[in-house]
Amino acid sequence: MNIFRILDSIQQVDGDAAGRLAHTTRRMFMNRIGSSLATAAVPTAFAAVVNKAYGATPSVTEILNFALTLEYLEETFYFQANRMTNFIPAEYTLVFSQIERHETQHVDFLKGALGSQAVDRPQFDFTYGGAFPDAWTNFMTFITISAALEDTGVRAYKGQAGNLITAPAILEYALQVHSVEARHASLVRRIIGHLKKDPMMKGWITQDQGFPPAVYKGATPESNTVHAGLDAATLSGIGSISRDNVTEAFDEPLTMEEVLAIAGPFIKKMGM
C-alpha cells in the first residue's frame, strides 16, 4: 500500500486535501507508523485518517438539495408577494419581479442538475412561527424578511464553496448564484435605508449588525477581519480605513447547520 502515492492522488482531485489532512502530515504519519502501529495496521489507520478528513463533508447532492430548499424558500416568498394587490409599492414592483425571476432560474438549474434526486418544494410559513405576524400586510416587515433571506443566501453559498471544490462546474455556478444573491441583498438593504431614512443602513454589512441577529453572527461572524491568518484590520498601510470598513469588505460564511437553524422556522413541512 503506497500511502504517499494515494495522498498525491487525493491532492490531484481535491485542492483542499492538504488542509483536510493537515493533522496527518507525512512526518506525523511516518512517526505513527514507526512508533505505535504495526505494518499490518497501516491500511486501517490510513482509512481512519481519510474518513476523519472527509467523513463530515456533505456530498454534492446534499449541497445541491440544501441550496434548492433555500431557493424554493426565496422563490415562493417573492411569488406570493408579487401576486398580492397593492402590497409592494409601485416603484419597487419591477425590483421584486426581477428577483423572483432570478430565484426561479436558480430553482430550475438546481432541479435540472439533481434530476430525480431533487427534493420537493416544502410548505412554508413566512410568519416564522408567528414572529412576523404582519409579513403579508406590512411592507416593511416583508422587506426586512427579504433582506434576512438574501443575506443568509449570500453567506450560505460562501459556506459551501469549499465543499464543492471537487465539482468545479457546480462550484462555478454556485459562485455565480452567490454573486446574484449579493446584488439582491445590496439592493434590498439600500431600499430599507431609503424607506427608513437611515444612512447607516448600507448596501453592505457593518460589523455584525442586522436583524435578526442570527443572520449576521455564527461561528465566523460578519465582524470577522481575519483572513488567511492575517488580520486585515491591522495590516500595514491600511491607513485611515476603519475596522468597520474592513468588515464591510467581506461577506463571511455560514455553516449548513447555522443556515438550517435560521431557515428552519420558515419551513412548515419538508417536501418528500
Image (spheres, rainbow, N blue to C red):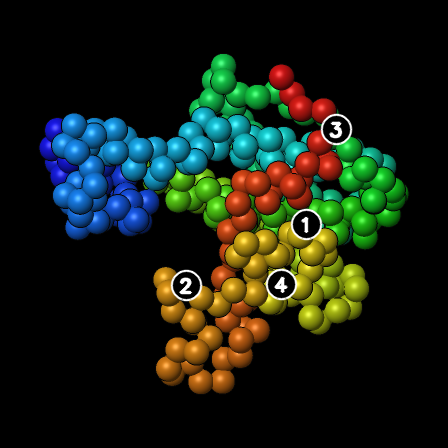
Label 1: how many Cα within 10 Å (few below 14, some 14–19, many 20+):
many
Relative to 261, 181 lies left or right: left
- Amino acid type assigned to the residue bearing label 3 in the image: Lys
Which quadrant of the figure contains the C terminus?
top right
Which numbered dot is residue 268?
A: 3
Q: Amino acid at mark 2?
A: His
Residue at figure coordinates x 65%, y 41% from the top left: 261
**In the picture provided, is 82 more to the left or to the right than 74?**
right
Q: Quadrant of residue 232?
A: bottom left
Relative depth, front residue between 10 and 212: 10
Disc 1 to disc 4, how far (Cα)? 13 Å
- CA distance separating discs 1 and 2: 24 Å
Q: Which amino acid lies under the numbered mark 4 shown in the image of this protein? A: Asp
Q: Could you say where residue 167 lies in the image, as x and y percent from the top left?
A: 34, 34
Decide which of tag 1 and tag 3 comes sooner along the chain.
Answer: 1
- The residue pinned by badge 2 equals 227
| Residue 29 visible to an observer of this rendering | no
| CB contact under 8 Å: marks 1 and 2 | no
Mark in the foreground, 1 or 3: 3
The residue under label 4 is: 208
